[in-house]
Image (tube, grey):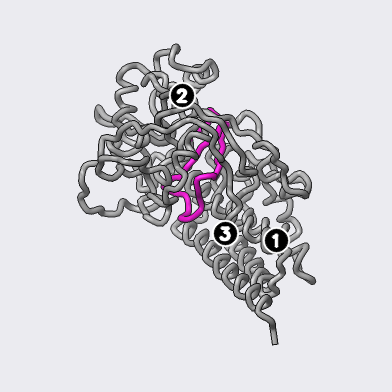
Amino acid sequence: MRDSAEDTVAAADGGLAARYRRVRTMTEDLAAPLSAEDQTAQSMPDCSPAKWHRAHTTWFFETFLLTPFLPGYRLFDPGYAYLFNSYYEAVGARHPRPQRGMITRPGVAEVAAYRAHVDEAMDRLLARADERARPLVELGLAHEEQHQELLLMDLLHLFSLNPLNPAYRPVRPEPASPAPGAGCWLAFDGGTRMVGHDGAGFAFDNEGPRHPVLLQPFRLFSRPVGNAGWLAFIADGGYRTPALWLADGWAAVQAQGWEAPGHWRRRDGGWHVMTLAGEVPVEPDAPVCHVSFYEADAFARWSGRRLPTEAEWEVAAAGLPATGNTLGTGALRPRPGPPGPDAAPVQMFGDVWEWTASPYGRYPGYRPASGAVGEYNGKFMANQMVLRGGCCVTPDGHTRASYRNFFYPHQRWMFAGLRLAEDA
């Protein structure tokens, strides 16, 4: 008869197995409305085809869990190690990222068979209740949730280039709601504060170690910047005023011809935006989305304010429920906030990732994990900026106050916006 400790391990792994199935099913549900052609095209080097996301997340479990932990496991196809490795140099050579759209074979049916093969083997591995594998399973599930968001980001960019403006999902009718609040400035005391993950539950390695930071008193606006404010920035010549921009940002404006956020188009004298529900008029009360760090920084200068540091953002978010307009709402686009007045920051989680003024780097005492999985976060700690919070296509429950997202300052195909801060 098993003792209570063994029962506890089995129950825990039973829960992990159920979560594994939920996450894997969600990926397939997201891909289900897509044709084979939708799943194979690649719209730019930063994006990947939906089919590749489905295969790469499967490769992760096969490479880091099944091969080392499940005796007798048979690779589905040895060639997939080259096709579907992303950036793990320690694992071996890989297909060039800008050419992922050239991978017409394997097709979507073969990728589905690959996923089924790996899922069956993972069921067997999880039934073994091997505690050595558990942290990597948790990492693999968080990794797949990241790719669920990436799949939708990349798909929106792909559809935005299609002259037919296809909709991934039609707009869902929504009941009338009260006008959102105007927002207000919220004051936060200075002093020494602790930031970083506290060790309870899963976190990526770049979220720790938890450490003290010294903050000066600051104020944070209770709501993210909305489209109405951005329209005023455009009308005031924001994209034509070099004094507002960092040098690299102004160079990007000139080179890319930016005159509005990503996916915005002029139509009939007004602005429309491409969404996963197709092209729709820009909604003034919704948070602005698809802006680069350079644009966020320029808007903050135009406003006479600044972007918050990531530590300020985390201190403001501490203790708030990490819930909001995320993937589970089905909106698939930023939505107006709740009616005011605000006693605490709103829309910190969901709607849009929020740019901070902080470069992405190591926390004091940070050490990447050993082995190939140590390449997951640490090797990207240069030339990128931190975003916080989550967005409208972030899977429910994926984010938290300590979560550190990061992108290059010129990138804007992700669901990124901003919130203003100022010195107190």
Distance from the alpha carbon under mark 2 to that under mark 3:
41 Å
Residue at 56% x, 35% y is: 407
x and y percent of residue 259 in the render? 39, 23
Residue at 63% x, 53% y is: 56
- The amino acid type of the residue labelled 2 equals Asp
Q: Earlier in the sequence, mark 1 or mark 3?
A: 1
Quadrant of the rendered image containing residue 130:
bottom right
Residue labelled with disc 1: 62
Residue labelled with disc 2: 297
Residue labelled with disc 3: 108
Q: Quadrant of the C terminus?
A: top left
Q: Quadrant of the N terminus?
A: bottom right
Distance from the alpha carbon under mark 1 to that under mark 3:
18 Å
Front residue of 126 and 50: 126
Q: Look at discs 2 and 3 and give the one toward the viewer.
A: 2
Check disc 1: other Cα within 10 Å, few if <14, some if 14-19, many if 20+: many
Under circle 2, the secondary element is helix
Front residue of 314 and 232: 314
Q: Is residue 100 above or below residue 30?
A: above
Under circle 1, the secondary element is helix
Q: Earlier in the sequence, mark 2 or mark 3?
A: 3
